[in-house]
Structures are given as C-alpha cells and as structure tokens.
Image (cartoon, coloured by chain):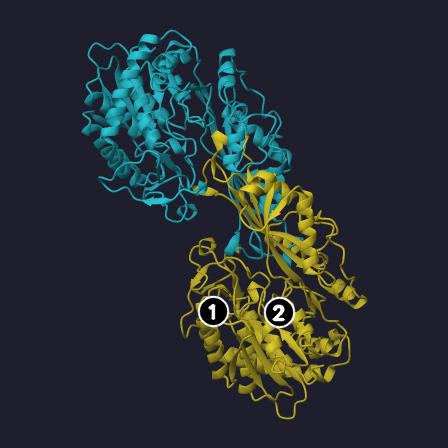
Chain colours: A cyan, B yellow
C-alpha cells in the first residue's frame, strides 16, 4: 500500500513517503482518540455568530480563537491595520530551534450573511446540529452534539462557517496540537493568521500586511479554505480567482403604481432590468459584453497537464445537483473555472409570494459577481460591464436619481462597485509547490487533485505583492457543503482528514 | 355658476341640476361641521389591520363596520357563501316608503398585503398618521390625528386601506348619515354591501351573490372604489378590467452553489428567468406573446367620444412620476388602459443588498399581473402565456421538480395561476348611466371625466351575471394615493367630496 501510494506521486520521494505515512497514522490515532473533545470545542466555536459585518459577535470569535491558541501554548496577538476599529486578524507564531524556514497557515473566521428564513426547518445558522447527510439528499436532522456523545465521522455539522472557513481555523490549530501531543518534531517555524473580513473582500488585509510585514514574513503561506475536489480526493490549489461584486439598481416611476391604472404605460423597472441582464449573457451562458474574455493569461503546459489529469465529474455533478444542461455545455466545469464569470447572485423587484401585490415597482435590483482569472484586472473588467450598460442606453447615477436626471434620461441605473481584487497563481513546478504536494500525498493512498486555480476567490495577490511570499491553497472540506448559502455543513470525516493533512505539511523539512 | 355647470352636462337637466346643487351645498356644510367626528371614526377604522388573508383582524373590520352601520340606524348583517369559515361581507338595507327602485352601494374593506419595511420611516400601515403632502413630493409627517384637532382638508391620512377601499365604506355610510341628519328625503331604496376579499380576487363573491340573490337585488349597484382622474375632476367609470395573476418559478440546481466553484457552468435560474421575461415583452412595452392583443372588443362610438374628451394628463404625469419615456410611447395612458396588459408585479431570486452573497440561486420567481379588457377571457389569456413559455423550451411542473423531471428536461418552470375574472363594461348611454352622470355632475362645477373602462379591476362581471343588474363605478379618492403599495394615503378633501358625491346619487329619483 505504502509503495503504491508513493508510486502515484510520480517522482522519487519514497523515503519521505514512508516516514510521513507513519506520521499520518499517528495523527489519525490521536484524532480518533480525542474526537469528542475536538467536537465539543468546534461546536462552541460555531455557536458564535460570525457574519463579517456583525462587529460585536465577530470580535467574540476572535477572542475564542485567542483562547484556543493559548490553550495550545501559542501566544495569540490581534493584528490590525491603520484604520481604527476594524475587525482584527488573530496571529500567533511557534519558533522551532534551529529552523531556518518558516511556513504560515491562514484561514478566516468570518462567514457570509445569513437569511435564517431560507434555512431548512430545524437548522439555524448559529445553532449547530448534526445531520446524517445533506437534507436535499434525504439526510435527517440528528439534533445537537451533546458532550460525550460518540462521534460518527460520516455525519455532518450544520451551521454558518462550519465549512467556510472555521473548519480551517480548527484544523490548523488541532494539527499543531496533535503534533505536540504525539511528540513529533517540526523542522520549520510556524505562523498562524486568522482573518475576520474575508467574506467582505478582505478589505483591510492590505493594511494588516503592510503594518505587520516583518511579523508575517514566511517562506510560504498555506491557505486552508475551500472544498476538496468533488471526487473526495485530497486537493491542492495553486491559484485562486479574483472577485468583484457589482450592484445594479434600475429605476421606474418615483412611487409604486397600481398596475391596473398605470400598467402598459409607466415603465416597469423589472422589465428594464430583465432586458439589461439578458443583454449581458445569452441563455446558453456566454457573456456578451465586449472584450469580456480578453486579457486572460494562457495556461502553462504544466497547468494544462494538471487540468487534464483532474477527473471530470460533470456527469456525477449533473445528477447530484439536478442539472440537465450546464451553461456553456461545450466546456467542462474545470475549463469554465479557468475563465472569468458573470453571475447573477440575486435579483429583486418589489415582492413575490404572499407579499406580492399588483404594482409597478419603483426599482429593480441585481447583484452581479464577476470572477477574474490571471490576466484580468478587476477594475478593467468592471469597466467593460459599465461600458456595456451605457451601450444599452443607460445613464449611470451615483445615488437615487434627481428630478433633473429623471427628466433628462430615459434609462437610469445606479451601479455600486464593491471592493474587488485580482486573481493569483503560483507556478506548480516551484520547489515549495512540489514539497507541499509530497506532504499531502503522504496522508492518502488516492492520487491528489492538483488545480492550477480554484473557482473561488481569496485576495491572495496580497501575499505575493505585500509579503513577497509564495502562497498555496490546501482545501479540506467536502464539496457539497452549501458554502455561502443556507444549510452550510461540513462532513466530520473531512475535518479529521484536514487535521492530518495540515500536520503533514507542518512536518515538511523543505519549505521553499 | 349653476347654469354654466348644467350647460356642461350637454343635455336638458336644468331643474335637477339646480336643486341638486343646493343639496350638495347642504351636505358640504354638514361635513364641514362634523369633520372632527368623521376623522376620529375613520382613524379608528384604519387602525384595524385589514390584509385580506389576516382572517382574525379582517373580522374585526367587519365588526367595526357593523357598529358604524348600527350607529346610523342601519341593521347590519354578515353575508356568507356556501364555503364555511370565509370572510363575510357586511350587508344592510334602507327601505324608502313608496320607492319602486333600489340602488346598491358597494365598497371593500380588505387591503393589499403590506411589507412594513418598505414604508417610509415614520409611516406604518396600521398606525394612520397625517402627512402634509406625499412624502415623495416633499410632504412632512404631521403625526397622528388627535381627538378634537382642527382638520386640514389638504392634508392626507396615511395607512393601508386609507384610499383603497375603506374610503369607500366611510364615504357611503357618512353620505347616508348626512342625508338623514340634514333631513333630506330619498326616493329610492338603498342597499349596502362591504366585501372583505376583494384584494384576493373576490374569491367567494360568487357564492355570496348566489346564496343571497334575492337580498342583493337592485336596479343598479354603484361601486365606490379606485381613484378620480389625475386632473382631480370627479369621475364615473362604466367598466373595469378583468385580472389574473400568474406566478412563475424557474429552477436551477437543487442546492445553492458557490458562484466561484460552479459559476459559468451550473445554470443560473435568474439568468433563465430574465431571458424568459424578456421574451414576453420587448423593452418598448409591447407584449410579444402570440395573439396577446386578439379578442379585444372594439370601443363603441360613445365610448370613443368619451375617451377623446378625457383630458390627456400624460405630460403632467410624466413629470410628477419622474417618467422620461413611457412604455408604448405611441399610445396615451388612456389608450393603454383599453388594452390587455402583462406587468411584472415582482421578481426575486436569492437576495440583494446586505443579504446578497456569492451564490448561484436555486430558483427565480416572478409574479405577473394580466389585466383583461372586454372580449378577453382570462383563462384563454393565461393559456397564451403558458403556450409562450412552452415555446421557449420550458417544461411546466406542478410542484418542486422531481429527480425524474430534472433529468429529463433542460428548463423547468412552475406556473401558479390564481383565481381570475373577466372585464365588465356597462353601456354609457343607458338611462341609469346618464342619471348617475347627472347626479355626480350636480356636485361640481368642473366637467366630469367619463371612462368607458378604468385601468383597475374588480369582479364586476358577477353583478351582471349572477345578480342580473347594472353596475357603475364612482371612484372618489385622489389618484396619487399609493394604492396597493407602501405609503398608501388619502387626501382628506377627497373623502369629504366623496361623501357629497354619494349623497347626490342616493337622492336620484331615476335609477334605471
């Protein structure tokens, strides 16, 4: 078994492989023995609401992480930037005598906004409960985890942040603790950084990096975030997409109008918006905005090869997600991820359901998500969208339209561009890239899935640009985790395996 | 003055005209003297929540109306149909010795749904307050009306139902009381009917009519609902449009997906919906559904003439509503009202604003409002919409799609057709049509606005089909009342003038 695992690696790392596998087993035993305590602490962590903008609760999360770190003998410190009063990042560091290299581990403790009404009956964002499987696939709610209960690793924990990304925080700190408690000796210095503003675009991470540059110096930073490949195989990601959100508000009459008295005459902003959105992207999924797919940096040969080796799970995914025909059906999901996107995150005009009434709405809103790949500049990408909107006859306003603007322009739109950032990609054939690959491979018999870039976004360009370091992402959670949405969950087995993966990386002796 | 008023009528009614004008002045004085009591009672009425589906509160409204009637010496009775437990209509009747003719007065006491969050700060649907003018036009909140306060008729009362259509109930009952208190002698029998399910399509009015046909017999029924013409002139409406709502739900993947991990690949139901809606109606406002404008009964010459005489207020409206270019700009608003419509009442997919997150939504919903004119059959009109949706490649499902449906069809839609009804139109040259016209004209120096049909809808075809009677609508409230929407309001002067108008109709001696 061990030999076949190492063969899969495809290059000569047999000795590392054998010893690491032993280490992996040690960690596995440790986790298995301590699973009840690990669960208890994690459930307490998930019970603290962590929506990024909930500044009171977000600090409770930071305090909880500080306690977690100090219980493990890691001196914790809150790092801030130059802007006063913003959510701090939690930092810690472990110096290894004689080590000349340093590896940092990053995760984020904030979560996406929640609309509790959209969660399944019996699930609440901040009251974690166990579920036997995803509820959409017939899973059952097994109730809250009670202290001392046996832990079924095939069950899941439901709650905001359970997967994205408190899982990263818990796995990093428990991997370190497991190494200490099992008496294994690290060969590198280790740094920890837990951010609290990732889900709002890491808007102060640049400040934190600039102000604490020396403290955050490392040969490389490992990002623990995002899901493992849909096949369940362990995964390494060498890049992330950039991201920027664009809010659109199209205006109708100044006041809501009775649809009988004014319908057919007063402009309906929902009708305007559907025409505008339909003009941006065809019904096959191709973006129609001029130059939208320009600027994309072509893949290297290594990246192309890695991409070709990733199992294509599209048919499985289609079945599991209930999708008949994907967008851009001539491209696989993997190919799609290497391109920029335009997604409608949400849209609303007046009300639907029981609150609907016979009105012509005053406005119609949509929020777009633009994902960016290497080569894209987020500001330029947004400019293409704005140019398209103008080409459709819209006048862009900065706020609710004034009387004068209303009298002057037939079509008015407010465009709100949120803070965005560009994509990042670390070459896959750097020594550090290969070392991480070997370490992760040592924990599993299955071949790894190596992504030149993942679909999701993190502002990892900051690591490269400000900290002048390399950055590689090692996702640990199950792919079907409902990340960013209602009923978010993490499969317990993936948490345990995440601890093993991270412990293996911490034991690496080659970090650059 | 009196003579010129009567000249405007264009036919020989001079004697009626002179005496009626005197009567109108008597009522005016009565209202002016009793305005504080009228306000107090109306504010109490508006404070009772009246959303049609709020079955507990809706009955409190019915009880309040019963008390109002009994305070005025009208024996009140709750009428129901054959379905158990539905909201009753409140009925009453006054027999006039020697009268051979009967006129009924109808209004409804239920209101459209409310979303209090959408109301202006300081306004609440069921805590009526006074405002100096519409808040959109710089009006100020003057606070609640306090017992004994002087009444400024240029102010408005804000609250759900203030205009639509508790105003009808209060004006009818106070018109009757004013006649009694000022000792004026009616020549006809009077019936009162106040419905509590109008805003949900009068779904049991047919049952109520069938079960109480004898009781509800009248030579004609006068409907007090809807707004006066935008010019402010008193208005008579000889027809109403029919109406039917159609709810659409388009489906994406079974669970919400991370827009980075699945964007560009997993179908986005919001994108599907915008393409579907855009295919139904072009960006100029023309409905593109096959045969949509067929079946329309052409206007008679009298109707065409009446329409031509209505002042075209489009330029004024455009300015007041902040509209640059109306839909179908080659048609006036008046012409538009004589055609069927397709309006997007509301649309939603996932969330916008602070709740927005980077997801691919699981579904996208829209609610359509189809207004119908004479000649349209509402079921046939809905069938045209459904045929169009199918022609766009959709498979129609009855509920959340099953696994099998998901695997079989690329595009799935749930279509929910609500109870609808057809339009109604009373010929404008019938004797009763002309009598009402004379009565209303007697209360004002301004020429009337006579609509062959109004834009709004009421199930008035039931009066014709079941009660076999004629039906004419006399709207009394200000046009800018935010009917059906947030910040609904009624201008107090319009309530007082409504009482005068109805009193004049009650004094008519020719009812058919």
Q: Residues within 10 Å of mark 2 (few under 14, many from 20)?
A: many
| Residue B49 found in image quarter | bottom left
Task: State the image coordinates of residue B257 (x, y, percent, origin top left).
Answer: 47, 36
Q: Residue furthest front?
A: A1
Q: Residue furthest top?
A: A12
As helix, strand or loop, the secondary structure at mark 2 comes to loop
The chain ID associated with circle 1 is: B
The CA span between labels 1 and 2 is 23 Å
Task: State the image coordinates of residue A104 (x, y, percent, origin top left).
Answer: 31, 19
Are the residues at dot 1 and dot 2 in contact (C-beta closer than 8 Å)? no
Q: Residue at x 55, y 28 (%)?
A: A383
The chain ID associated with circle 2 is: B
Q: Is residue B378 above or below residue B234?
A: above
In front here: B483 or B53? B53
Same chain under badges 1 and 2? The reply is yes
Q: Residue furthest right?
A: B301
Q: Is residue B149 visible?
A: yes
Quadrant where the image shows the C terminus of chain A: top left
As helix, strand or loop, the secondary structure at mark 1 comes to helix
First in sequence: mark 1 vs mark 2: 1
- Residue position marked by numbered label 1 in the rendering: B58
Quadrant where the image shows the N terminus of chain A: top left
- Residue position marked by numbered label 2 in the rendering: B475
In front here: B108 or B488? B108
Circle on res. A353: none
In front here: A379 or A116? A116
Task: State the image coordinates of residue B121 (x, y, percent, origin top left).
Answer: 43, 55
Q: Residues within 10 Å of mark 1 (few under 14, many from 20)?
A: many
Q: Residue at x 46, y 72 (%)?
A: B59
Q: Residue at x 68, y 60 (%)?
A: B378
Task: State the image coordinates of residue B394 (x, y, percent, origin top left).
Answer: 64, 43
């Amino acid at each position: 078994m061990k030999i076949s695992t190492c063969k899969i690696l495809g290059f000569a790392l047999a000795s590392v492989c054998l010893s690491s596998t032993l280490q992996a087993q040690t960690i596995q035993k440790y986790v298995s023995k301590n699973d009840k305590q690990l669960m208890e602490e994690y459930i307490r962590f998930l019970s603290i609401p962590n929506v990024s903008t909930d500044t009171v609760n977000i600090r409770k999360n930071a305090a909880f992480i500080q306690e977690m770190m100090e219980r493990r003998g890691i001196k914790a410190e809150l790092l801030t930037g130059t802007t006063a009063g913003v959510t701090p990042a939690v930092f810690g560091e472990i110096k290894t005598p004689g080590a000349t290299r340093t590896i940092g581990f990053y995760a984020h403790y904030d979560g996406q906004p929640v609309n509790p009404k959209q969660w399944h009956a019996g699930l609440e964002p901040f009251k974690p409960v166990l579920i036997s499987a995803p509820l959409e696939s017939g899973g059952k709610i097994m109730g809250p985890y009670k202290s001392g209960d046996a832990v079924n690793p095939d069950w899941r924990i439901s709650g905001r942040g359970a997967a994205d990304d408190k899982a990263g925080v818990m796995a990093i700190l428990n991997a370190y603790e497991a190494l200490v408690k099992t008496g294994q000796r690290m060969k590198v210095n280790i740094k920890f950084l837990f951010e609290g503003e990732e889900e709002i675009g890491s808007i102060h991470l640049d400040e934190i990096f600039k102000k604490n540059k020396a403290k955050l110096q490392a040969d490389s930073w490992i990002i623990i975030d995002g899901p493992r490949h849909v096949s369940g195989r362990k995964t390494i990601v060498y890049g992330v997409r950039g991201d920027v959100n664009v809010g659109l508000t199209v205006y109708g009459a100044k006041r809501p109008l009775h649809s009988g008295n004014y319908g057919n005459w007063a402009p309906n902003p929902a009708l305007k918006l559907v025409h505008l959105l339909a003009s941006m992207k065809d019904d096959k999924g191709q973006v129609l905005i001029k130059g939208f797919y320009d600027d994309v940096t072509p893949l290297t040969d290594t990246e192309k090869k890695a991409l070709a080796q990733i199992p294509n799970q599209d048919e499985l995914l289609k079945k599991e997600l209930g999708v008949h025909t994907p967008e851009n059906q001539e491209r696989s999901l993997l190919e799609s991820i290497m391109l920029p996107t335009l997604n409608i995150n949400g849209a609303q005009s007046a009300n639907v359901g029981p609150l609907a009434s016979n009105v012509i709405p005053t406005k119609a809103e949509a929020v777009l998500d633009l994902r960016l790949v290497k080569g894209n500049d987020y500001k330029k990408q947004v400019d293409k969208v704005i140019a398209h909107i103008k080409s459709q006859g819209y006048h862009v306003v900065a706020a609710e339209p004034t009387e004068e603007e209303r009298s002057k322009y037939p079509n008015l739109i407010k465009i709100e561009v949120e803070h965005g950032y560009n994509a990042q990609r670390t070459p896959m054939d750097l020594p550090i890239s290969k070392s991480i690959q070997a370490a992760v491979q040592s924990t599993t018999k299955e071949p790894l899935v190596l992504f030149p870039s993942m679909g999701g976004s993190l502002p990892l360009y900051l690591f490269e640009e400000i900290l002048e370091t390399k950055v590689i992402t090692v996702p640990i959670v199950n792919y079907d985790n409902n990340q960013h949405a209602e009923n978010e969950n993490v499969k317990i087995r993936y948490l345990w395996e995440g601890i093993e993966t991270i412990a293996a990386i911490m034991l690496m002796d080659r970090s650059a």
